[in-house]
């Protein structure tokens, strides 16, 4: 059983001003995920409960100037720096307009206090299947930029999630930013979450969908599912079933069933595997129906 309210273990604390200095502080003897932190909303409780062993030094990324920026340009798309707060992402005008699912997912994370402190990149690097930003980032084809002393590389988000709590980060690498390409002008997206308590509750399941419709026919489709498998999942089979089809209630029901069929849900104290599968089907149906509705519907399902 987890024991709360324990004191933090002893460790050195460093707040380097540049990425290069942060990289040089990393110890080769510990995984990066036990050494760096941004908001600390996942990291500090884990240290207190001794879920992770204290590293020799804890590296605070929030001292690195410019890493909290959120920028958009018409060529590169949206860039979210590693220290951009969840709240700032949820309220950003370009995110709300062009990447609506992400604005909605971010607005549904925890509480206002946690959203001011925690980061979207931390939510991704923590790599739990219920992370509310993950399905939204997946439907927007996010690339994860990883930096190390060897240079920079970019990893598609769907390859970044390896297992529960495990990412494709190599030893000595830190995530510096997320890049979301410019969506097509006609693309609309949304995120729906099932959480019994409404706020301050992890997703029993979460669903993000992005669609491009041309006079009722699907020209591009992305569906991603949270808490549907050990990692946040793209529903490729369901996406393929939508492509070049005219959207109607029958198609939506068929596609939702396909999405649920290809999940690997698990039973936990929060929900059974079969309940999760049924609710994923319901949320995919609702998300598709919302996006198939006329575009004069409210842009955001959730206000941050
Ligand atoms: C009470 C409570 C309620 C919560 N509710 C929700 C919820 O409803 N939905 C939800 O999705 N989450 C929820 N969370 C989880 C949490 O708030 C998020 O996961 C948060 O986004 C983590 O961001 P952070 O900056 O605080 O991460 P940190 O705690 O700083 O880091 C998390 C992990 O990511 C690693 N990491 C962070 N940044 C980097 C980087 N740049 N490069 C490499 N590794 C990095 C760290 O080493 C650590 O392992 C909740 C947490 C609490 C405590």
Image: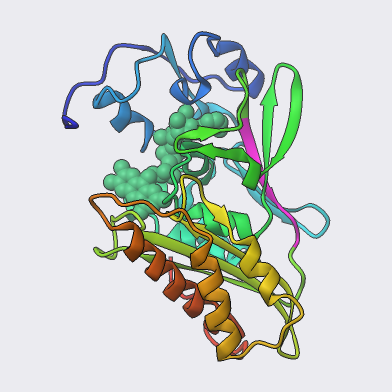
Residue 59, compared with residue 119, is above or below; it is: above
Viewer-closest of 4 and 112: 4
Residue 202, compared with residue 246, is above or below; it is: above
| Left or right of 71, for residue 262 | left
Q: Quadrant of the N terminus?
A: top left
Quarter of the image where one finds residue 274: bottom left
Prevailing secondary structure of the magenta residues: strand
Q: Is residue 120 at least partly visible in the picture?
A: yes
Q: Is residue 38 at least partly visible in the picture?
A: no
Count of numbered marks: 0
Query: Ligand 1 lies in which image quarter?
Result: top left
| Left or right of 234, for residue 216 | right
Does 162 appear in magenta?
no
Q: Residue at x 45, y 38 (%)?
A: 164
Please give the range of residues in magenta.
175-182
Can you give x and y, in whole percent of width and height, for residue 300 in the image? 51, 75
Q: Residue at x 68, y 51 (%)?
A: 71
Q: Quadrant of the C terminus?
A: bottom left
Viewer-closest of 78 and 161: 161
Can you give x and y, in whole percent of width and height, for residue 225 in the image? 51, 59
């Amino acid at each position: 059983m987890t024991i709360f309210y324990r004191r933090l273990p002893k460790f050195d604390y460093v707040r380097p001003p540049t990425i290069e200095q942060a990289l040089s502080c990393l110890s080769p003897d510990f995984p990066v995920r036990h050494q760096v932190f941004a908001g600390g909303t996942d990291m500090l409780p884990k240290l207190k409960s001794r879920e992770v062993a204290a590293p020799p030094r804890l590296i605070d990324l929030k001292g690195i100037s410019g890493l909290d920026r959120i920028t958009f340009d018409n060529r590169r798309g949206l860039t979210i720096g590693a220290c951009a707060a969840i709240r700032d992402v949820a309220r950003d005008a370009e995110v709300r307009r062009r990447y609506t699912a992400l604005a909605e997912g971010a607005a549904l994370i925890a509480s206002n206090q946690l959203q001011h402190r925690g980061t979207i990149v931390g939510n991704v690097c923590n790599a739990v299947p219920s992370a509310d930003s993950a399905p939204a980032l997946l439907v927007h084809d996010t690339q994860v930029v990883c930096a190390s002393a060897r240079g920079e590389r970019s990893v598609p988000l769907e390859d970044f999630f390896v297992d529960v709590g495990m990412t494709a980060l190599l030893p000595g690498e830190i995530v510096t930013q997320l890049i979301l390409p410019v969506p097509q002008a006609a693309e609309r997206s949304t995120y729906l979450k099932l959480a019994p308590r409404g706020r301050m509750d992890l997703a029993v399941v979460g669903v993000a969908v992005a669609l491009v419709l041309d006079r009722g026919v699907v020209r591009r489709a992305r569906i991603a599912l949270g808490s549907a498998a050990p990692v946040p999942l793209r529903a490729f089979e369901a996406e393929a079933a939508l492509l070049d089809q005219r959207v109607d209630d029958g198609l939506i029901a068929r596609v939702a069933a396909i999405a649920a069929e290809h999940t690997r849900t698990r039973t936990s104290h929060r929900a059974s595997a079969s309940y999760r599968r049924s609710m994923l089907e319901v949320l995919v149906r609702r998300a598709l129906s919302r996006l198939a509705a006329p575009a004069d519907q409210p842009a955001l399902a959730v206000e941050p």
